[in-house]
């Protein structure tokens, strides 16, 4: 079994900062890509940022230059540093990881429990 446990989030004023963390645990052989998604009320879940095992990053245009994704491979943990937050960043944020549980097995797609981020104007 693999679990992704998120921490961080909460309420912040516009212009403020928050940091999200997501730690993978359980029967893990290797972690491939990790990512953060978000879903605002009435909208589809969207990719915020992703990072490969080698550290290559990708960001949604709406968060470029404000958010930074990083990972600690020794802890199987991914982070999202969110600066200059805007009200439109308000959403439930989910971490995602592609994880191989055994050698040569097909990687599985795992999700965190979600955490609310609310940015007040």
Image (tube, rainbow, N blue to C red):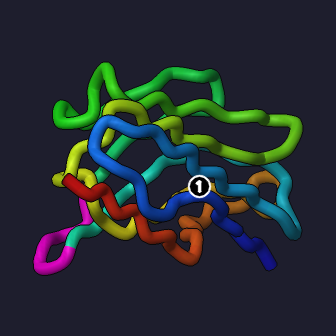
Q: Residue at x 45, y 51 (%)?
A: 36
Most extreme residue toward the left, as rendered? 42
Decide which of 38, 52 is in the foreground and name it: 38
Would you place residue 55 above or below residue 40 in this image? Answer: above
State the residue at coordinates (63%, 22%): 54
* In-image side of 63 versus 88 (left or right): right
Please identify the quarter of the rendering in which residue 46 is found.
bottom left
Q: Is residue 90 left or right of residue 67?
A: left
Residue at screen point 48% across, 47% down: 35
User: For residue 72, what is the image quadrant?
Assistant: top right
The residue range painted magenta reads: 41-46
Residue 82 located left or right of residue 120: right
Q: Is 29 rendered above or below residue 92?
A: above
User: Which quadrant would residue 6 be assigned to in this image?
Assistant: bottom right
Q: In x, y percent, where is residue 67?
A: 40, 32
Residue 111, horizontal then vertical, whole percent: 55, 70
Image coordinates of residue 60 in percent, x first then y, are 24, 37
Per the picture, the main secondary structure of the magenta-coloured stretch is: loop
Count of marks, rendered view:
1
Image location (x, y in percent) of residue 32: 63, 43
Q: Secondary structure at mark 1?
A: strand
According to the picture, the residue beneath numbered tag 1 turns out to be 98
Crowding at mark 1 (Cα within 10 Å: few <14, some 14-19, many 20+): some
62 part of magenta stretch: no
- Location of the N terminus (image quadrant): bottom right
* Of 120 and 31, the residue lying toward us: 120
């Amino acid at each position: 079994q693999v679990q992704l446990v998120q921490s961080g989030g909460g309420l912040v004023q516009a212009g403020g900062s928050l940091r999200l963390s997501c730690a993978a645990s359980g029967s893990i052989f290797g972690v491939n890509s990790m990512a953060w998604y978000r879903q605002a009320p009435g909208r589809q879940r969207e990719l915020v940022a992703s990072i490969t095992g080698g550290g290559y990053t990708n960001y949604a245009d709406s968060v470029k230059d404000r958010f930074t994704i990083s990972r600690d491979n020794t802890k199987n943990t991914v982070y999202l540093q969110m600066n200059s937050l805007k009200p439109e960043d308000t959403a439930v944020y989910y971490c995602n990881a592609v994880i191989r549980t055994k050698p040569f097995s097909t990687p599985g797609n795992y999700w965190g429990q979600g955490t609310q981020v609310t940015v007040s104007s």
